[in-house]
Amino acid sequence: QQPVIRQKLAGMVAKTESVYSWYEALTYQMTQLPYDEQSAKLAGTMSLLKYHSTRAAWDIADDAVQIFGGRGITQSGMGAYVERFMRTNKFAAILGGSEEVMADLGIKMASKSPAFATAKL
């Protein structure tokens, strides 16, 4: 009913859909490339996807807590799932490489690509 809540929900859905779409595209690319080429050609994209997905998860968790208010920080009742997501989503950002390391690796790998050299940024 509230425009502010709808705005937060729209942002949460958009972030979720962008991560899912990128994940699907990367998965398709992995199925089409030979195994020995996957690391060289997709490592940068994977790193940037991990960075983007963990940042999106943090933003989504924060918005969910804002929507739920005080219930979003309780460990039981209606806010239990929101609280658990907020508490545990940071583990995904840490395991397998911190966000800063993943972003740096992604840019290093992308800058080696011929397409990057001709891109107009």
Image: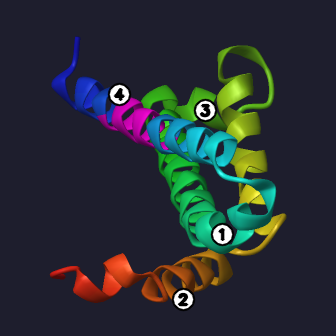
- Residue for badge 2: 108
Q: Which span is picked out in magenta?
A: 11-19
> What element does badge 3 sit on?
helix
> What element does badge 4 sit on?
helix
**Figure label count:** 4
- Residue for badge 3: 72
> What element does badge 2 sit on?
helix
Residue closest to the far right: 95
- Quadrant placement of the N terminus: top left
Q: CA distance from mark 1 to mark 3?
A: 36 Å
Q: Which mark is in front, 3 or 2?
A: 2
Q: Which mark is residue 100?
A: none
Q: Which mark is residue 43?
A: 1
- Residue for badge 4: 9
**Residue 21 falls in image quadrant:** top left
For residue 10: magenta? no
The residue type indicated by label 4 comes to Leu
Front-lying residue, 14 or 20? 20
N-term mark: 2 or 1: 1
Q: Which mark is in front, 1 or 3?
A: 1
The residue type indicated by label 1 comes to Ala
Residue 1 position (above or below residue 72): above
N-term mark: 1 or 3: 1
Q: Residue at x 17, y 24 (%)?
A: 3
Front-lying residue, 46 or 56? 46
Q: CA distance from mark 4 to mark 1?
A: 31 Å
